[in-house]
Amino acid sequence: MKSLSLSLPGGYNIQPPAGVPTGGLETGEAGEKIIQFGIEAIFTISLILVVIFIIISGIQWIVSGGDKEKIQKAKGRITYSVVGLLVIIGAFFIVSTLISLFGGNPSFFLKTP
């Protein structure tokens, strides 16, 4: 993927009017790395938060002492955490699909050692 702007399939280029910045996000340059870091950070932070909320809710359920109201609140938090996890996974697949539709590598933000 050479650039995201001012090019058409088949190698045709659009000539911009005078004074308009040209170019796009070149592969491996700062713009792509910023987007990659942002996507990685959002997914990582959200997954960490989901795990923390599930653990906290489980602990609250355990220490509820049989109080039905506390158990219901803990169950609700666990349910919302699992739904949040499903939303995160869905967003991951949507982002991967959009990146591949625009001609990019859909796993570009999944670094392998």
Image: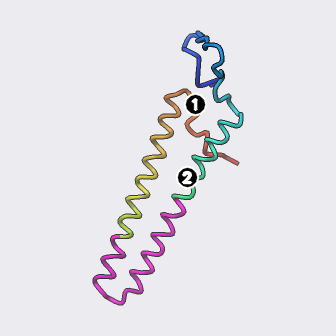
Query: Residue beneath label 2, please?
Result: 42
Q: Is residue 71 visible?
A: yes
Does residue 60 appear to the left or right of 70 in the view shown? Answer: right
The crowding category of the residue bearing disc 2, from other C-alpha atoms within 10 Å (few below 14, some 14 to 19, many at least 20), is few
Quarter that holds the N terminus: top right
Q: Residue at x 55, y 27 (%)?
A: 103
Q: Residue at x 55, y 14 (%)?
A: 8
- Going by the picture, which residue comes out furthest to the front? 19
**Residue 105 at what x, y percent from top left?**
59, 33
Query: Residue beneath label 1, please?
Result: 104
Mark 2: secondary structure: helix
Q: Which residue is drawn at 61% across and 39% down?
A: 108
The image quadrant that residue 5 belongs to is top right
**Residue 3 at what x, y percent from top left?**
63, 24
The image quadrant that residue 78 belongs to is bottom left
Q: Can residue 2 be seen in this view?
A: no
68 falls in the magenta region:
yes
Amino acid at pointer 2:
Ile
Position above or below: 67 against 72: below
**Residue 40 at what x, y percent from top left?**
59, 49
Amino acid at pointer 1:
Gly
